[in-house]
Image: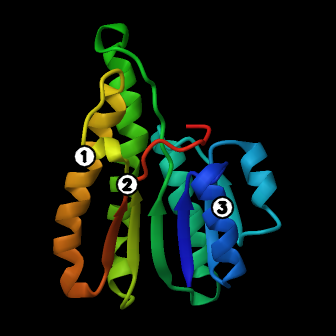
């Protein structure tokens, strides 16, 4: 069973990729930095360094996953969208570009990854998608409007996706951590 996991440089992503590998899953770990990938190289099945805020970065992750799936005809069992960016600040301090960057990484990248790999997931009974959202996806906080906006979007998308994938026995889970001590 192959699991594609983004945001593996540190925190939840790094810990989860290590744990899943120990359980015997084939993990394709997407990292933002060479340093993050180097740490995981001997632990997970495959690493890829990519900026999910760019189309090229998203394509690199998709290519790495497809390459692993084509190796020995493996099946995609799960996608864990964990990568994220956060640029706190008052609304009048932030340019609209901050909202675009935030939306590209926290929302558009997961949507594109799921869209491109959805048929593979639907073909595997019991497959799953896990979205790392935030309590900010439920309750917006001051000085964090860009991040909160992306998490609200991810929540709505995931709720719709869950209903649509139910007939295919593909489960969609949203994880909503509160403030945690991570690099984010």
Residue bearing mark 3: 15
Q: Are marks 2 and 1 in contact (CB under 8 Å)?
A: yes
Q: Which residue is drawn at the image coordinates 50% and 48% (left, top)?
A: 83
Instruction: Give me the C-alpha separation between circle 2 and circle 3.
Output: 17 Å
Mark 2 residue crowding within 10 angstroms, few (<14) / some (14–19) / many (20+): some
84 vs 60: above or below: above
Q: Position of residue 144 (x, y in %)?
A: 36, 26
Query: Which quadrant is the C terminus positioned in?
Result: top right
Mark 3 residue crowding within 10 angstroms, few (<14) / some (14–19) / many (20+): few
Q: Which residue is drawn at the image coordinates 31% and 36% (left, top)?
A: 148
Query: Which quadrant is the N terminus positioned in?
Result: bottom right
183, 104: nearer the viewer: 183
Residue bearing mark 1: 138
Disc nearer the start of the sequence (3/1): 3
Mark 1 residue crowding within 10 angstroms, few (<14) / some (14–19) / many (20+): some
Q: Position of residue 141 (x, y in %)?
A: 30, 30
Q: Which residue is drawn at the image coordinates 71% and 72% (left, top)?
A: 45
Q: Which residue is drawn at the image coordinates 69% and 42% (left, top)?
A: 33
Residue 155 left/right relative to 18: left
Residue bearing mark 2: 176
Q: Secondary structure at mark 1?
A: loop
Q: Position of residue 84 (x, y in %)?
A: 48, 43
Residue 180 left/right relative to 137: right
Q: Are marks 3 and 1 in contact (CB under 8 Å)?
A: no
Disc nearer the start of the sequence (2/1): 1
Instruction: Give me the C-alpha separation between circle 3 and circle 1.
Output: 25 Å
Q: Secondary structure at mark 3?
A: helix
Foreground disc of the pair 3, 1 = 1
Quarter where residue 132 is shown: bottom left
């Amino acid at each position: 069973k192959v699991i594609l996991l983004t945001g593996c440089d540190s925190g939840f992503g790094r810990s989860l990729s290590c744990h899943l590998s120990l359980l015997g899953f084939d993990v394709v770990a997407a990292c933002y930095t060479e340093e993050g990938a180097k740490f995981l190289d001997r632990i997970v099945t495959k690493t890829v360094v990519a900026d999910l805020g760019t189309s090229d970065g998203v394509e690199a992750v998709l290519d790495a996953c497809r390459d692993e799936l084509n190796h020995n005809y493996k099946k995609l069992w799960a996608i864990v969208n964990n990568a994220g960016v956060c640029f706190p600040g008052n609304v009048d301090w932030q340019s609209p570009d901050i909202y675009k960057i935030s939306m590209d990484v926290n929302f558009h990248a997961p949507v594109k990854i799921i869209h491109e790999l959805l048929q593979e997931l639907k073909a595997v009974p019991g497959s799953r998608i896990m979205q790392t959202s935030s309590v900010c996806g439920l309750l917006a906080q001051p000085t964090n409007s860009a991040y909160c906006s992306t998490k609200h979007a991810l929540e709505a998308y995931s709720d719709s996706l869950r209903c649509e994938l139910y007939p295919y026995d593909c489960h969609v889970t949203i994880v909503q951590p509160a403030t945690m001590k991570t690099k984010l």
